Image (cartoon, rainbow, N blue to C red):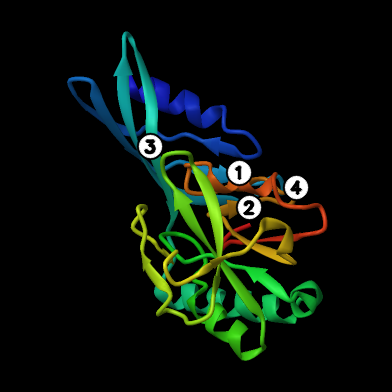
Amino acid sequence: SITRVFKAQLKETGGFQILADTPQAYSDGSIGWVAGQPTLKLPDGTEIPLRLTAVFQKEQDDWKIVQWHVSIGISNEDLIEKQNQIENRLFEFANFIEAHIALLYMPHANVVDTTRMIDRCFSVHKIIALPAFDTENYTIQLYKIDNFPADMKMGPRQIMEPDPDRCKIIPMDRIDIAIIPGVVLDEKGGRIGSGEGYYDRFIGKLPITTRKVALSLEC
């Protein structure tokens, strides 16, 4: 059943212990979908309630996850406070202060909002790179942003990204510090993102000299 496959997938997630609940599962022909409220257990014992949905496709007799989404419940007041704390810590971070060219990201669901950080970077004279996504090859191309948000357009993932007609490519080896999005992180560098694997592939290609910093509302 879809429920059995979904719970088995949760138990096999690497880097974190996810305690599966009893999700609600539905199917229509070869397409199925699941909604659940599992709990993420960190190495220090901290438990974080999640909301998770997934879409399945049936191939022969097996169900395969084709897309999933995870979110963390948080009040608006707590969210604003966490965002402010994260921003201030980043701009007080010595490696970030020293960096000349900084890679950031455009915000989307369940990650730290970087919009104000990008604006603030211009005020301290940093060169800003933002990612554009190739949804066919699951790769990332970096572009230099001179006028924000005028240099942006809606991308194929429904996230604002640099307009190639207005922006110049920045080679990966020019990045001094890379700010990486994450839904949940752990102390060993384990990361849960959007589930599409863009940053998982991208991080490994960054130079050793590039400082990598992940932002998350929970860690």
According to the image, label 2 marks what residue? 185
Give the distance between the C-alpha atoms of the residues marked 1 and 2, in whole angstroms.
13 Å
Amino acid type, callout 1: Asp
Asked if residue 24 lies left or right of residue 9, the reply is left
* Relative height, residue 161 to residue 41 (above, below): below
Give the distance between the C-alpha atoms of the residues marked 4 and 3, in whole angstroms.
26 Å
Nearer-N-terminus badge (2/3) = 3
* Relative height, residue 165 to residue 5 (above, below): below
Give the distance between the C-alpha atoms of the residues marked 1 and 4, in whole angstroms.
15 Å
Nearer-N-terminus badge (1/4) = 4
Secondary structure type for disc 4: loop
Give the distance between the C-alpha atoms of the residues marked 3 and 1, in whole angstroms.
16 Å
* Label 3 packing within 10 angstroms: few (<14), some (14-19), many (20+): some
* Relative height, residue 177 to residue 122 (above, below): above
Q: Quadrant of residue 87?
A: bottom right
Residue 174 pos. (x, y %): 72, 63
Q: Which residue lies furthest to the left in this view?
A: 28
Q: Which mark is residue 78?
A: none
Give the distance between the C-alpha atoms of the residues marked 2 and 3, in whole angstroms.
20 Å
According to the image, label 3 marks what residue? 67
According to the image, label 4 marks what residue? 188
Secondary structure type for disc 2: strand
* Relative height, residue 68 to residue 213 (above, below): above
Nearer-N-terminus badge (3/1) = 3
Amino acid type, callout 3: Gln
Residue visible at 53% across and 65% down? Answer: 105
